[in-house]
Amino acid sequence: MHGYSISDVADICGVSKETVRRWDKSGKLNADRNETNDHRVYSKQQLLQFDEGRLFFEKSHSQPETPKREYSCIELFAGAGGLALGLEKAGFETVLLNEVDKDACLTLKENRPNWNVQHEDIAKIDFTPFAGNVDLVSGGFPCQAFSFAGKKLGFEDTRGTLFFEFARCLREVKPTMFLAENVRGILRHDDGRTLETIVSVLDDLGYHVFAPTLLKAIHHGVPQKRERVIIVGVKKEVWNESNFTWPTPKGKIYTVKDALKKGELFPNDVPESQGQSYPESKRKVMELVPQGGYWRDLPLEIQKDYMKKSFFMGGGKTGMARRMSWDEPSLTLTCAPAQKQTERCHPEETRPFTTREYARIQTFPDEWNFSGKQTSIYKQIGNAVPVNLGEAIGNSLVKHLNSLSL
C-alpha cells in the first residue's frame, strides 16, 4: 500500500513531527504499517480532515498559462538569478537586473549574456527611462527596521533602507504589478510593524496589496523545506477587474533523492562538482550520525563533547550535527553547508553537500553556472529563491496579467 510517513504528514500539514505523533497517540490519526520497513504510514483520506491536507490534495493545481503578450520585468536584488530564472520560465522578459555583489553579477552575465545586468548600488540607478513600459518589478529587499517616531510612516520615512529603493523603483517605473519576497521573519519583525509599514507605503504608491502570504517551497516542486513571504500588488485602477490567485500545491513532495538522482526533477544524476569537506575531528563525529539523524543520535559522551555548553541549554538544536535523509526534503539551505548550527550533511557520504548538489536542491538547472570562489558560490545559491518556486509564482502573475484589460 502507498502511505504518507510522519515526515510527509508534517510537511503537508505544516506542523512538526512531534505534533503528528501526538495526533497518532490521541487517535486523531490511525497509522498503518509500511509493508517494506514496518514504519507508520497514513492514508490520503486521513489527511483530508485537515485544511492543509485538503489544500494539498484537492485544489486544482496551478497550471502554466501562456502570456497573451510579452510581459516585461525589472528584477532588483537579483542575486544569482533564482527568481529571475523562474519568472523567465513563466514567460517574463527581464529588461533590467540590479545586483551589488560582483560574483552574482558575473553569474547572471555568464548564463544570460543578453540580460541587462547592472552591477551597481541600487541608490545610484535611475529607473525613469523605464516609466510606463514595464509590467512587473520584482525582488527580495533585505528586511530592515524603521524608526517609528511618527504616527504613520510614509514613503520618505523609509529613506535609508533598501525597501525605500524598491519603493522608489515602483514610483519611477509605475509597473502594473510588483512582486516582493522575504524571509518568514518579516511577519513578526518589530512586532509586525515593519510589514505593516511596507504595505502602507505600497498602498500610498497606488497599489492594491494582496494579503502577504507564506509559501512553502516543498509544495511547489522544490525538494527543500524553505519558506518565503510573498507580497504581490497591482495598480489600484485595474485590481478590481480580477482576483489574484496564489499558486496551489503540486500535490507531491520531492525529496533529496529526487534532487540528486535521475527522476522527475532532473534527467540525470547530479554531476560532480567542488565542495567543502569536514576537518578530520568533525568527520569522525559525523560518521556516527545515522541518515536523517542529528546530535542526539550520538553516544552521550560524544554529544557532550561536541555540543559543549549547548548540551545543557534548552531547545532541540536539530540543525546541529544533522545528516539529511534520502527520503525527505532537505532542510533550508544556508550560505554555508558546514556551519555547526545548520549542518547539511550528505545522506550517505560523510561530507557537506557539494555546490552542484546545493544548486539541485534549489532547483537550478545543471547548465546554470556560478562564478566566484567556492564560498561565494555557496552563498549565492543559499540566498537564492528556488527556481521552481519562482516559476510557480510567475505563473500566477501571468494569469493575473492575462486577465486585466491593458
Image (cartoon, rainbow, N blue to C red):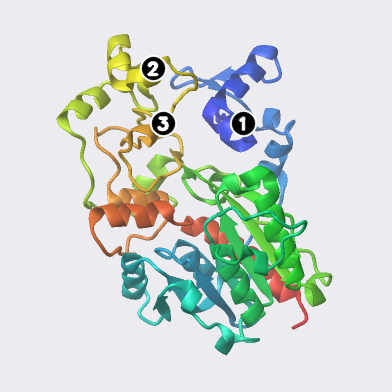
Judge whether 85 appears above or below 223 on screen. below
Residue drawn at 31 percent across, 73 percent down: 110
Disc nearest the viewer among 1 and 2: 2
Judge whether 341 appears above or below 302 on screen. below
Query: Amino acid under label 3?
Result: Gly
| Residue on which disc 1 sits | 15
Q: Is residue 10 visible?
A: yes
Label 3, label 2: how far apart the Cα atoms are: 13 Å
Considering depth in this image, is 319 or 348 the residue closer to the camera? 319
| Residue on which disc 2 sits | 311
Label 1, label 3: how far apart the Cα atoms are: 17 Å
How many marks the image carries: the answer is: 3
Q: Secondary structure at mark 3?
A: loop
Judge whether 302 appears above or below 392 on screen. above
Characterize the local packing of mark 3: few (<14), some (14-19) or many (20 or more) Cα atoms within 10 angstroms.
some
Residue drawn at 53 percent across, 42 percent down: 253
Decide which of tag 1 and tag 3 comes sooner along the chain: 1
Characterize the local packing of mark 2: few (<14), some (14-19) or many (20 or more) Cα atoms within 10 angstroms.
some
Query: Amino acid under label 2?
Result: Phe
| Residue on which disc 3 sits | 319
Characterize the local packing of mark 1: few (<14), some (14-19) or many (20 or more) Cα atoms within 10 angstroms.
few
| Image position, residue 234 (x, y; %) | 72, 70
Decide which of tag 3 and tag 2 comes sooner along the chain: 2
Considering depth in this image, is 118 or 90 the residue closer to the camera? 118
Q: Secondary structure at mark 1?
A: loop
Q: Is residue 245 visible?
A: no
